[in-house]
Amino acid sequence: MQIFTQINDIQTSLGFLKKEIHTIGFVPTMGALHAGHLSLIEKAQTENDIVVCSIFVNPVQFNNKEDFDKYPVQDDVDIALLKKNGCDVLFIPSVKEMYPETPNESFSFGQLENVMEGSFRPGHFNGVAIVVKKLFEIIKPDKAYFGEKDFQQLMIIQALVRQLNFDIEIVPCPIIREADGLAMSSRNVRLTLHQRAIAPQIYALLKHCVEHAAIASVAEVKEEFITKFSAFPEFKLDYFEIADENSLQPISSWKDSKSPRAFAAIFMDNVRLIDNMKIFCNFAKS
């Protein structure tokens, strides 16, 4: 595996590969890698000649400095994992390399960014767009791979690619879960043993509500989630929403969407976890 820390160096190397008609699959990450990230790399391997991964904890997408300061960093472990799992090229730049000057770009994604994560984390998606745009310009991939756990981010990145007319295919990849259902996340390592034992209830609550959708209205499903959620004092709810997965707009009736999805964001002390689940049902009630 080749490792680069400088933009010019990786651009030169990938430029030679492109001339040899190699296709590039790209997996951008913030490190603290887990099986979810590795599943993206595995998918990229099946569809491309070269797999490039980046590790960069992007400061401009954190609206909470404490969250940025506590984000897990384990570069040596991550590099070993990438070598073992077939990554061909790793880009691991410093903040100064990525942002020699404070970035001031501004993006607009309309209704996609004004709900859920966008509502509770102001400026977050603009920071995501800044770093993804720069990484795409550096790597120039044919395909880029993103997990559906960060579903709203996935939709924002698809919109970014359309806005900038990038010739890049964005490949959504399914959520990878622990055996107990908890969605894999780099933040999971910050949970205490007790919190980690309780955290799978997020998945259980989502699953129950998705199943309940077959016999209940949207309002009833949301009320059921809140009621069951209140049994866990370890949880603090940021939001629970049922929205159309294409527009991300909340729905009030099952008739409002052909592709509804349940979304949740929950705090356990200062660790924020998100999850979502597609709703497949022939709905009995509106």
Image (cartoon, rainbow, N blue to C red):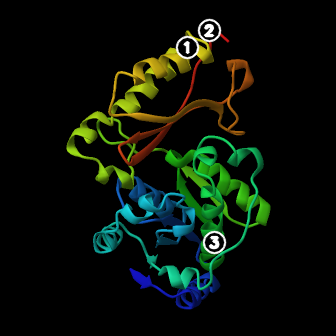
Vertical side of 34 occupied by 55: above or below: below
The label shown at residue 136 is: 3
Q: Is residue 213 visible?
A: no
Q: Earlier in the sequence, mark 1 or mark 3?
A: 3
Q: Which residue is mark 2?
A: 284
Measuring from the top left, give residue 130's x and y in whole percent. Answer: 65, 68
The residue identified by callout 1 is: 214
Q: Which mark is residue 189?
A: none
Is the residue under label 2 in contact with that under label 1 (CB below 8 Å)? yes
Structural distance between the alpha carbons of marks 1 and 2:
6 Å
Q: Is residue 19 visible?
A: yes
Quarter of the image that includes the C terminus:
top right
Task: Determine whether, in the image, residue 198 is placed left or right of residue 282.
Answer: left
From the top left corner, tell me how far across and down residue 105 is, in percent.
72, 70
Q: Identify the image quadrant of the N terminus.
A: bottom left
In three-dimensional space, the C-alpha distance between marks 2 and 3, rounded to whole angstroms, equals: 45 Å
Query: Is the residue marked by circle 1 packed among few (<14), some (14-19), or many (20+) residues within 10 Å?
Result: some
Compare marks 1 and 2 and give the one earlier in the sequence: 1
Secondary structure beneath label 3:
helix
